[in-house]
Amino acid sequence: MKKTEKRLTGDYFEEMTADWMKKNGYKIVARNWVKHPYELDIVALKNETLVFTEVKSANVSNYEPPEKNIDREKMISLVRGAAAFLKELEERGVNISRLEKRFDAVSITFDEKREPVEFKYYENYFICTDDRFAPSERKETDTDGLDK
């Protein structure tokens, strides 16, 4: 199946993000991980933290920054996808309880030639207080486990 221009652009900026992450001490564990209906752009390990990174890009002519597309619904989907990913790790014998978990985001704006104009990396873009993801000192949760 032929990839759309939007998908090719997304792949390009996900590759750029993975390269940036590697240069900054992250070990890429998975890219474009899919377990229908969930998809995770990049899963990486940094020290003892498993990082789920969502990459968003948009042309500079857009009025909204790309990261604004990570709305509450998308966050819930990311959390559910991350839970499925963690379950797979556990099934393979990985002790995930020793790892901190974090949800990061990348925002890339680009020009008409698809050249990046701005690259922003957000650590802890949102926090999930679900016990599978919450830092040990956080136990309270709201109705869907998300704090921003």
Image (cartoon, helix red, strand yellow):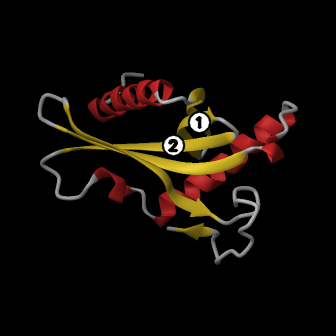
The N terminus lies in which quarter of the figure?
top left
Q: Which amino acid, by three-letter code, is at mark 2?
A: Thr
Mark 1 vs 2: CB contact within 8 A: yes
Residue 81 place in picture, x, y as percent: 63, 48
Residue matched to label 1:
43
Residue at 81 percent across and 44 percent down: it is 98
Which comes sooner in the sequence, label 1 or label 2?
1
Instruction: Residue at 88%, 32% (x, y): give it.
Output: 93
Which residue is rendered at x = 54% and y = 29% of the image?
Answer: 25
User: According to the image, label 2 marks what residue?
Assistant: 53
Residue type at mark 1 is: Val
Please give the count of numbered marks on the rendered protein. Answer: 2
Looking at the rendered structure, which numbered label has been put on residue 14? none
The image quarter containing residue 58 is: top left
User: Does residue 38 lie above or below 116 as drawn?
Assistant: below
Relative side of 25 to 94, left or right: left
Q: Secondary structure at mark 2?
A: strand
